[in-house]
Amino acid sequence: MTLVVDKIDCVGCEECLQVCSATAIIMSREKAEIVQQKCNLCERCILICPVKAIKTVSTHCSR
């Protein structure tokens, strides 16, 4: 599983940046971006996002 930011929905409020204990969120072109290598999947960013722009995505392959 990974967390992704919907760049269309993100309003650049930086709320997620403030709650990320892993410092895995950066701002790029005034939008949040998750650095996957640093993310510990705590999902605090999902809970705090006022526009629900951060979502979980399954990384499992189906055959």
Image (tube, rainbow, N blue to C red):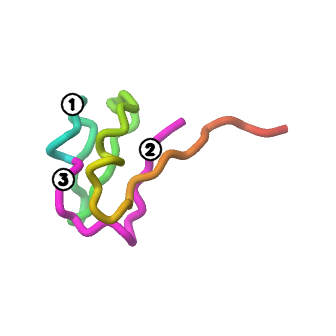
Q: Position of residue 63 (x, y in %)?
A: 85, 38
What span is colored magenta in the figure? 1-16
On-image quarter of the N terminus: top right
Q: CA distance from mark 1 to mark 2?
A: 15 Å
Q: Quadrant of residue 45?
A: top left
The residue type indicated by label 1 comes to Ser
Whether the residues at callouts 2 and 3 have beta carbons within 8 Å, the answer is no
Does 7 sit left or right of 29 as displayed?
A: right
The residue shown at (50%, 45%) is 56
Q: Quadrant of residue 11?
A: bottom left
The kind of secondary structure element at disc 3 is helix
Tell me the number on the disc at residue 3: 2
The correct choice, above or below, for 55 with respect to 36 in the image is below
* Residue at point 44%, 44% (across, down): 3
Q: How many marks?
A: 3
Residue 61 appears at what percent x and percent y? 73, 37
Q: Earlier in the sequence, mark 3 or mark 1?
A: 3
Q: Nearer the viewer, mark 2 or mark 3?
A: 3
Circle 3 packing at 10 Å, graded few (<14), some (14-19), many (20+), is: few
Q: Looking at the picture, which amino acid does disc 2 mark?
A: Leu
Task: Using the numbered discs, state the Cα–Cα distance from disc 2 to disc 3 in whole angstroms.
Answer: 15 Å
Residue highlighted by disc 1: 21
- Please give the residue where the numbered disc 3 appears in the rendered image: 15
Q: Residues within 10 Å of mark 2 (few under 14, many from 20)?
A: many
Q: Nearer the viewer, residue 63 or 53?
A: 53
Q: Is residue 4 left or right of residue 44?
A: right
- The secondary structure type at the circle numbered 1 is loop
